[in-house]
Amino acid sequence: MTQSQRWHGIGGAAGSSTPKAIPNSMYLSCKLAFFGDNPWPLVDPVTGAVYTLPAKARFDVGTPNG
């Protein structure tokens, strides 16, 4: 409906009507080193864009081990 992704009530009362930004990761505080220049997180919490895992990108070009 709004072409955006929002969580309601994070850090507040259940059912809060104030939208909160979705964090890049609920587990990691920063990008993993092996992502290099590749986008992180794999799914952008703001736009919903899905990116390719670095290991899959290496496999696709024929260099799966580095």
Image: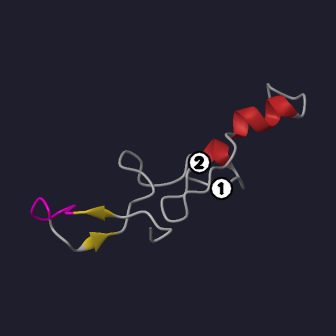
Extreme-top residue of the structure: 65
Q: Residue at x 13, y 65 (%)?
A: 12
Residue 36, above or below 45:
above
Camera-nearest residue between 33 and 14: 14
Quadrant (top left, top right, bottom left, bottom right) of the C terminus? top right
Extreme-bottom residue of the structure: 18
Q: Is residue 10 magenta?
A: yes
Q: Are marks 1 and 2 in contact (CB under 8 Å)?
A: yes
Q: Which mark is residue 42?
A: 2
How many numbered dots are placed on residues in this image? 2
Camera-nearest residue between 3 and 47: 3
Q: Is residue 7 magenta?
A: no
Q: Residue at x 48, y 59 (%)?
A: 45
- Where in the figure is residue 34, as x and y percent of width and height? 65, 42
Extreme-left residue of the structure: 13
Q: Main secondary structure of the magenta part?
A: loop
Q: Residues within 10 Å of mark 2 (few under 14, many from 20)?
A: some
Helix or strand or loop: what does disc 2 sit on?
loop
- Cα–Cα span, label 1 and label 2: 7 Å
Residue 18, above or below 29:
below
Residue 53, above or below 2:
above
Q: Quadrant of residue 18?
A: bottom left
Horizontal side, residue 5 vs residue 51: left or right: left
Residue type at the position of mark 2: Leu
- Where in the figure is residue 3, as x and y percent of width and height? 50, 68
Q: Which mark is residue 39?
A: 1
Q: Residue at x 67, y 40 (%)?
A: 53
Magenta stretch in the rendered image: 9-15
Residue type at the position of mark 1: Pro
Horizontal side, residue 56 vs residue 28: left or right: right
